[in-house]
Amino acid sequence: MTLTNQRQFATTARGLQRDTPPMKLFEKAKKYGIWNPSEIDFSQDKLDWQSLSPDEKDVILRLTSQFQAGEEAVTLDLLPLIMTVAKEGRIEEEMFLTTFLWEEAKHTDFFNRFLIEVTGDPGDLSRYHLDSYRTIFYDALPTALNRLTHDQSPEAQLIAAVTYNMIVEGTLAETGYYSYYTALRNNNIMPGTTHGIDLLKQDESRHIAYGIFLISRLVAEHPHLWEVAEGTMNTLLMPALGVVTEAFACYDPIPFNLDLDTFVSYATMQFQKRFDRIAKSRGAALSEVYQITHTAIDQDNA
């Protein structure tokens, strides 16, 4: 009996498509993504932490608890997307996604170091995960990503990317960075933490760029999915804004002179600019999606 192996390897059949957005992001990940959370100096941060008021400590713990759980959630939930892309033979996207998963694990490490070494191990922080946060991170995110274990349809991929890249990273994480910078850098405190956030934000900008590319590619390839994309984005926007409003409602006055309306407006702006970019993929050729993505990547130093 003769066995015939039908498998074909892209790199020996056609080579890598180095001009694609995922490969450009892979090149950036190799250049900018090599940093070690264990090398960040928290010595000044420890001193600054001791000088904070109870409410100031509490708001930083609240913000960090949301990031810490979010980074761990993605580290746990991302694998089905990688497997889906791999099954489709998209080697360039899979190569980038290997850096994506590693970086999420690295971010989990960073926030854990902060909690242990700077705050002195505050214990169980799940008390900070309020209703809207749980709607997204305890329900929508794992549901959307785990669906890919049994349903790799374009619709399932689209919902996963919108939930994760558009809402979790592109709206909530971006607003979280802004919160750290406003509270810490603007007050010239905790330089190790803000340096780590700088590096983390660089990583996440590549993740968001890939996610918006993936959503745009799927909408361009399957125009009827625009309604799914739009519906998912609009459905998740409200709990995303709720994460912000529910957190700020816990304080009166809000520590560090943070202003609720400023952060709601910032979150909405992050959402809208990515919504507008995805909308351009309706009826667009794939070459147009590639060009729009290349331009966005070139404008971002991460």
Image (cartoon, helix red, strand yellow):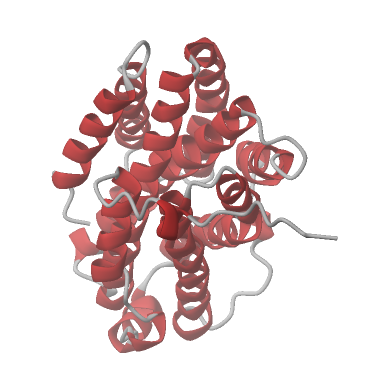
Relative to residue 197, is residue 16 depicted above or below? above
Closer-to-camera residue (234/8): 8
Report x, y in % for residue 253.
Answer: 40, 45
State which quadrant residue 159 falls in. top right
Q: Residue furthest right?
A: 1
What x and y, as percent, mark residue 63? 47, 56
Question: Looking at the image, which residue sits at the far front?
Answer: 1
Q: Is residue 3 above or below residue 154?
A: below
- 248 vs 183, left or right, is right
Question: Can residue 207 be seen?
Answer: yes
Residue ID at (62%, 47%) = 87
| Quadrant the C terminus occupies | bottom left
Q: Quadrant of the N terminus?
A: bottom right
Query: Is residue 175 something one can see in this rendering?
Result: no
Vertical comparison of 273 with 41: above or below: above
Left or right position of 60 against 86 = left
- Specify the quadrant of the image occupied by residue 261: top left
Q: Residue 232 at what x, y percent from top left?
A: 56, 22
* Front in this rendered view, residue 4 or 59: 4
Q: Identify the residue at horizontal 34%, vertical 60% (top origin).
A: 203
Identity of the residue drawn at 26% across and 64% down:
198
Identity of the residue drawn at 33% across and 80% down: 45
Total marks shown come to 0
Coordinates of residue 257 in the picture (x, y in percent): 29, 48
